[in-house]
Amino acid sequence: MTVDARVRLPMERRPATSTVKPIEYTEDYDRVLATDRSRFRSKEELVNDMENAGIAKAIVHAEYEHGDFADELNLAVAQFVSSQPLLFWGVGTVSLAEAQPMRIVRQAETIKQSGLIGINIQPAFFGLAIDDARLFPLFSTASDLGLVVSIHTGINYTRHKPMDLERPEMLDRVACNFPDLRLVACHAAWPWVDTLCAVMRRHRNVYADFGGLAPRYIGENGTGWATLRRLMDGPLSEQILFATDWPVFPMDRAVREWEAIGLKPETLRNLMEKNSSRLYFEGKNE
């Protein structure tokens, strides 16, 4: 049962006000990732893509990069996943535009009550570091509620906020303070991959997903992935998650490229199914 650990809510299901972004949020994503051609794919296309790629379940994230749309997105994701609960699980989000800790805590509690299984945050897009003190009440609440927290790490292409706000050593500080909190480093923190590997070795509750990335580069020399590629076949085998960030990266291509880079069979099973099922299914039943 292949699980895609992170897909985006189809644009047609998002609150209309959240779909319009300032050009500084989109122009370089469109240039680097060609998101202008993929952005408006529908739920029907998502289901078809899953079927064609052999993906049995997708975890739909309430992901956003600007404004204050968390409450509306959480409702939209909850409604979306409840329509086909065998196919989709949902991950909510919180308001970071002003980062008011008690509001964020209340949103986390509502996320749990609505049946969602985690929280996605992208602090750097709002000028916040991963380990900003204003996020600590969120981490504490998520830990208490059994919610997985997924955090954007590594490079982004907005250019108006510094990307060093997303360095993985900040994730280490969060894990040290919240040892029971399950954390996912979205995009696996490239170009700081070696540091992320050290963080994951220290903390068994820190995972990495590879959404929006071409898996073939992880298997190639000189791309910055060598340490993680080696360790995912060994001590990090149970901390890696298959993800596409659909519609950013094609599901069928992601599956083909992961199958082609020579991972051990057990590593590939962990990546494609077992780790996500264990991480999120256990959280769903707490």
Image (cartoon, rainbow, N blue to C red):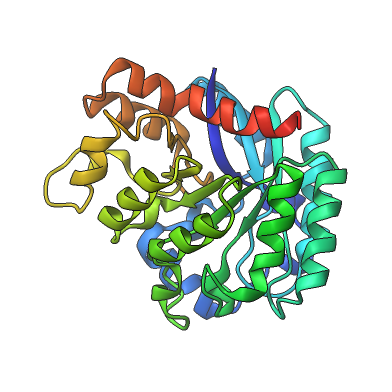
**Is residue 172 toward the left or the right of residue 49 in the image?**
left
Q: Position of residue 86 (x, y in %)?
A: 73, 22
Q: Please determine whether, in this image, residue 65 is positioned above or below residue 195.
A: below
**Residue 164 pos. (x, y %):** 39, 74
> Looking at the image, which is closer to me, 155 or 236?
236
Q: Nearer the viewer, residue 226 or 238?
A: 238
Report the quarter where the C terminus lies.
top right
The image shows residue 281, relative to residue 269, as above or below, that is: below
Depth check: 236 or 154 in front? 236
Identify the residue at image location x=54%, y=78%.
23
Quarter of the rendering occupied by the N terminus:
top right
Residue located 27% across and 29% down the image: 234
Left or right relative to 276: residue 190? left
> At x 40% / y 61%, what residue is drawn?
168
Res. 45 image quadrant: top right
Residue pictured at 31% horizontal, 39% vertical:
215
Return the residue nearer the eye: 72 or 95.
Answer: 95
- Quarter-of-image position of residue 182: top right
Residue 236's quadrant in the figure? top left
Q: Residue 108's spot in the image, x, y percent?
A: 78, 56
